[in-house]
Amino acid sequence: MREELQKIENETLAAVQSAESIKALEELKVRFLGKKGVLTLILKKMGGLSPEERPVIGKLANETRFKIESAIAAKSFELEKAALNQSLIAEKIDVTMPGKPFKLGKKHPLSKVLDEVKEIFLGMGYSIAEGPEIETDYYNFESLNIPRNHPARDIQDTFYIDENVVLRTQTSPVQMRYMQSNKPPIRIIAPGRVYRSDNVDATHSPLFHQIEGLVVDTGIRMSDLKGSLETFAKRLYGGEAQVRFRPHHFPFTEPSCEMDVMCFSCHGEGCRLCKGEGWIEILGAGMVHPAVLENGGVDSEKYSGFAFGIGLERITMRRYNLDDMRLLFENDVRFLEQF
Ligand code: DAH
């Protein structure tokens, strides 16, 4: 049996040495050491040995098993290392190769200008308020001093959901909602989408954006309105920007006005950009009507305020010299990439 064991050892070690894969090693392991393996079969024959020989052969057999196991372990480590080296060479990464370009989106020009407007007003101590885009007739019109027969309610201009519910046509209802749930002093802007039943053309869209403003406190005067809005215009368009206020009418303010900025292109001379006016209108404003304050739960004897409404598309178009509002809504990346 000694010779037999020696023979198995020699053969197996040789086979292990020449094995070329982990799988081949596994097979060897089974063939020699497995339950029906060659070595196991030999050990089973040990019963026929003399009591003196048995421990000697048993020891020898264990040594053989140990040698084979060690050889398999060593070979398998070697093969794994080789496989790893192989794949490291095969999958080598060339860090100097140019990467795949990563397409990063950009902020929409409306968002950029809105961000600037927010910064300006936040810097003047305003906070930002919001209101629903689906509004009741009461908040959108009635509470703002726009009675049932007012032309602003014309079925042509307003998207009615039913008799009492509309898509808001202006951000002004946020003024009312804010007054009803907050006490003066109030200093807010309320940017958002508004809707009007207009056909799309270079200066109209059924969806556009406004930035509402409301200031209510004791002793607020027209001079506060003028100073605040002039400061806003100079921060947005630069210190050299010039503004003028023109009388106007809005049902929810008294007195009311519009603010123009001097045309940047012709400096008041009149040109194509300002349609020969020399000035460009950017917002409507006024002193909050006492009836509107009262609807908001504000004592109009004690408090006064001013309000304004800025057209975001309008100031964005002025800002980037765009002559067609549709550019802002078509979302053509060739246009958007330029900002
Ligand atoms: N809501 C007005 C509009 O859509 C704009 C406006 C004018 C808002 C004067 C105001 C304001 O708050 O005081 O035409």
Image (spheres, rainbow, N blue to C red):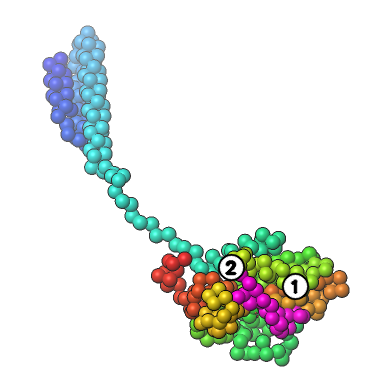
Left or right of residue 269: residue 258: right
Instruction: Find out if the beta carbon at label 1 lies less than 8 Å from the nearest ligand 1 atom.
Output: yes
Residue at the image position 14 percent from the left and 25 percent from the top:
14
Q: Between residues 307 and 330, which one lies in front from this camera angle? A: 307
Q: Quadrant of residue 334?
A: bottom left
- Answer whether residue 39 is magenta in the image: no
User: Which quarter of the image is occupied by the N terminus?
Assistant: top left
The picture places residue 205, in percent across and down from the top left corner, at 53, 81
Considering only order in the chain, which callout, 2 or 1, is on the residue closer to the N terminus? 2
The picture places residue 166, in percent across and down from the top left corner, at 64, 81
Q: CA distance from mark 1 to mark 2?
A: 22 Å
* Vertical relation: 329 (above or below) 126: below
For the record, the magenta segment spans 241-262
Outermost top residue: 52
Which residue carries the number 1 mark?
Answer: 306
Task: For residue 30, say whether it is visible.
Answer: no
Q: Between residues 151 and 20, which one lies in front from this camera angle? A: 151
- Label 2 neighbour load within 10 Å: few <14, some 14-19, many 20+: some
Residue at the image position 16 percent from the left and 27 percent from the top:
17
Q: Main secondary structure of the magenta part?
A: strand
Which residue carries the number 2 mark?
Answer: 237
